[in-house]
Amino acid sequence: MPSGKRWILRHCRNAHPHMCEYLIRKHGFSDLCRLPWDSGPKSKGSHLRDLMLDLLFVLKNLRPLREAQEIIAIGPMAPSVALLLKCRCLRSCQRVYWFGLFIHSPLWIRLLRASFRILDSTQLHYVLFSQFEKTLYAKAFSFDENRMVYLPYGDLSDLETQADAEVQLVKEPDDSRCFFSGGYSNRDYLSLIETFRSLPFKLIIVCSALNTEIREAIIPPNVKVLREVSSRLFDAYVKSAKACIIPIAHNTGAAGQSCLLRYMKNRKIIIATDTDVIREYITDGVSGILVNDNHESMASAIRAVNANTEGYRCYAEAAYESYARHFSGEALARQLDQMLDQGRERDGN
């Protein structure tokens, strides 16, 4: 299929860059981005604005897209493409992949139910980052499970993210060998902070400016909160951590995987809230510690790791082996190839 028949549409060029580079190089996709770069965490108003501007961008580029037979739509670009498909503006298109659909809030799942049912069509396939979400969205939005594709959230980057100058920033006495927790969405940082208020250990949290629930007045002396740090500095803190913690707020699908993979790749001891998605990556008692709540169970796990860090090192090694086997660049490339090949076989291409 010529490159003009396959398109990637994304809001910004830093959205899944390594995956898109692979699809362009290996499968001949053409890439269409509205912005060269954009930040991930945003307010709801900013997300709504992105949806409207992305729709205008797609309409502006509708002429070449009319000939497309296969489209991968990423992020806020996906609803615009789904709308055009529903309005029969993409008559040549055999498949559209809504890549990486996830909704963290139970409230928004209820509010968006009617919208998703309106946008759904037989050529639309949903690429999900967890098996759990197939059942969740099939029930919530009446999606056809045959058009829902599970693709593990993996890492196609072969670049080393460590920067020596930044690593030194976290090797000071106050910051080294602390517990670490990072990420923005669907996190229960308030419970984690309260847990550490009663513990004699140090915790570093790296989050977003949009995590407004964390107020300076509630932060105890043994907890340090940083916001909007660079990816390299984030990894530097991970490398220096005694153990990494993922406190999830709601068991509502994909959440925490990108941070979790960084912890697995860096051979870290992992303590996480037991959710259906986390369980697809970590096996309790083998490659990490899964807790039933973010209070007493979390505190018990933290105390256990602090008392016997070396004893839990085997968990970190098992997590790394799972990462290499299922979530590395090589593993994800195989999954992408299989997803596209199966789609074309169904269409007889």
Image: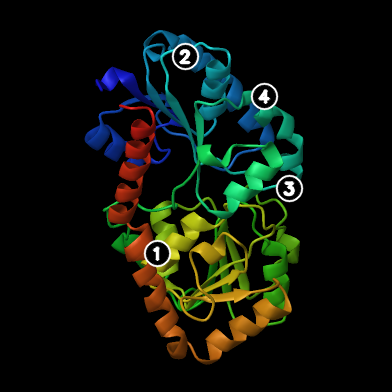
Q: Residue at x 54, y 26 (%)?
A: 122
Tell me if label 3 and label 1 are in contact, CB under 8 Å.
no
Amino acid type at mark 3:
Pro
Looking at the image, is 301 positioned above or below residue 14? below
| Of pointers 4 and 3, the one earlier in the residue sequence | 3
Tell me if label 4 and label 1 are in contact, CB under 8 Å.
no
| Of pointers 3 and 2, the one earlier in the residue sequence | 2
The dot on residue 106 is 3
Amino acid type at mark 1:
Ala
Point out residue 207 in the picture as x, y percentages from the top left corner.
57, 55
Which residue is the site of mark 1? 236
Within-10-Å neighbours for mark 4: few <14, some 14–19, many 20+: few
The alpha-carbon separation of the residues under discs 3 and 1 comes to 33 Å
| Of pointers 4 and 2, the one earlier in the residue sequence | 2
Point out residue 160 in the picture as x, y percentages from the top left corner.
28, 57
**Nearer the viewer's eye, disc 3 or disc 2?**
2
Which residue is the site of mark 2? 90
